[in-house]
Amino acid sequence: MPFPIHRPRRLRSNSILRRMVRETMLSPSDLIYPLFVTFGKGVRKKISSMPGCFQMSVDNIVKEAQKVYSLGIPAIILFGIPEHKDAKASEAYSPQGDVQKAVKAIKNKVPELMVITDVCLCEYTDHGHCGVIRKGKILNDPTLELLAKEALSHAKAGADMVAPSDMMDGRVAVIRDILDSNGYDDIPVMSYAAKYASAFYGPFREAAESTPSFGDRKSYQMDPANRREALKEVALDIEEGADIVMVKPAMSYMDIISDVKENFDLPVAAYNVSGEYSMIKAAAKMGWIDETKVMMELLTSFKRAGADLILTYHAVEAAKEMNR
């Protein structure tokens, strides 16, 4: 019998030894911090359902970006909340849009920070959906042109990477084409490749002011019950030119993260979404959990499942903990 010769507890006997044999190592360089850009000046508006997160005007976003970079976090991803919305999401691709202004300002002050931009229409449309609507139907192909224009406007502003999150069929291909044909062939595309129609997005809808005015997003985001379909979605995005593929959400979809990592030789990102973040915050406020320990355990589990990059609202707190 293996026992008493084999005693796995020998390698757990103290913190130094546990650290030496640890299989999964988490660092600030694994993290991407989502930020919400809004119009005006001096704005730092609390997001009630996401404690510790804010809608910020460009001047405050720049200050936040400087802090993020000082902690060793290599990248941020920007979401925009425009002053005006319309059916064609015109502020999404306006050269004077708040995201475009923020990209320029951040790259001017913190040029070493990787600035990623979310490419979607839902924050900019007056109906809150991610695509063009005709007779109550979200149209795929007419939406692609607008997404391509948005991605190009971000690249022209100085974005280091674009991240289409809309889940329209073919959007990676049209974005790759417009970037390449305009001299931005060096800009990577991080595709929200397996994005599920999840109930965990609730707090984000407040943060980005993007709640649909009718219906839901189940006709374009994935069914949470489907596992094999994720591999099909990822394969299509890679074929169209994606450089990084993302699974969203992360916590309830670690099987998908693992599947994607095992089947494709590309960097895999996982989005630790707003509902996952807010649950930890709420439970910690009630005194039910140790917030820091749960946060670090959850982030480590994403990396253990196969995530190379983790988009998380915990990024600043986690980086501080890791830098202690």
Image (cartoon, rainbow, N blue to C red):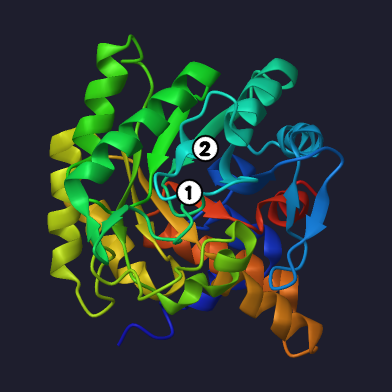
Residue 262 rendering spot, x and y as whole percentages: 22, 54
Label 2 packing within 10 angstroms: few (<14), some (14-19), many (20+): many
Which disc is residue 38 wearing?
none
Dot 1 or dot 2, earlier in sequence:
1
* Residue bearing the label numbered 1: 86
Residue 30 rendering spot, x and y as whole percentages: 54, 44
Q: Pointers 1 and 2 in contact (CB under 8 A)?
A: yes
Does residue 252 sit above or below 129 in this rendering? below
- In which quarter of the view is residue 237 placed? top left
The one nearer the camera, 138 or 55, is: 138
Q: Residue at x 52, y 61 (%)?
A: 210
Q: How many numbered marks appear?
A: 2
The one nearer the camera, 187 or 183, is: 183
* Mark 2 secondary-structure assignment: helix
Q: Amino acid at mark 1?
A: Asp
Residue closest to the far top: 183
Residue 234 rendering spot, x and y as whole percentages: 20, 51
Q: Is residue 265 visible?
A: no
